[in-house]
Image (spheres, rainbow, N blue to C red):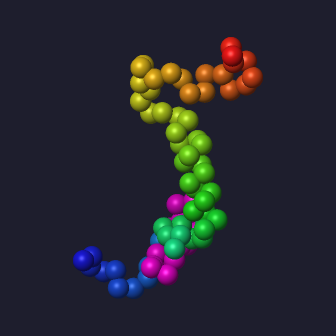
Amino acid sequence: MSAGETGARVIRCPACGGPSLYSPDNASRPFCSARCKNNDFGAWASEGYAVPADPDPDLPEPDAEPGGALPH
Ligand SMILES: [Zn+2]
C-alpha cells in the first residue's frame, strides 16, 4: 500500500491554516475539524465554481443577473 502511513501526521488545515491531524482517526482530514471541512466545501461550491478560469463561449453566464432583473 502506501509507505509512511503508519502514524498520524500534523499538516496544515486548508481551511483555517491551523494544525490538522492527518490520520485515519480524523474523519475530516485534511481539515482540522468537520466545521472547517464543511466551510471549505461551501466555499468551493459557491465561490469556486462562480469564477471560471476558462469561460466557455457556448455556456450561458450562470450569474449574469444576480438580482431580480430576470426577463422571466
Ligand atoms: Zn481548520
**Residue 20, image x and y in percent?**
53, 73
Placement of 3 over or under 41, stated as above or below = below
Residue 48 seen in this snapshot: yes
Q: Is residue 10 at least partly visible in the picture?
A: no
Q: Looking at the image, which residue is at 54% across and 48% down?
A: 44
Figure check: 34 above or below 38: below
Residue 14 drawn in magenta: yes
Identify the main secondary structure in magenta: loop
Q: Which residues are magenta?
A: 12-26
Residue 24: give x, y in percent of width and height.
45, 79
Describe residue 55's horizontal placement relative to residue 32 as left or right: left
71 is within the stretch colored magenta: no
Q: Residue furthest right?
A: 68
The residue nearer to you, when weighing 8 against 69, is 69
Residue 56, picture quadrant: top left
Q: Is 47 drawn above or below residue 13 in the view shown?
A: above
Locate the N terminus and report the quarter of the image it occupies: bottom left
Q: Is residue 63 above or below residue 71?
A: below
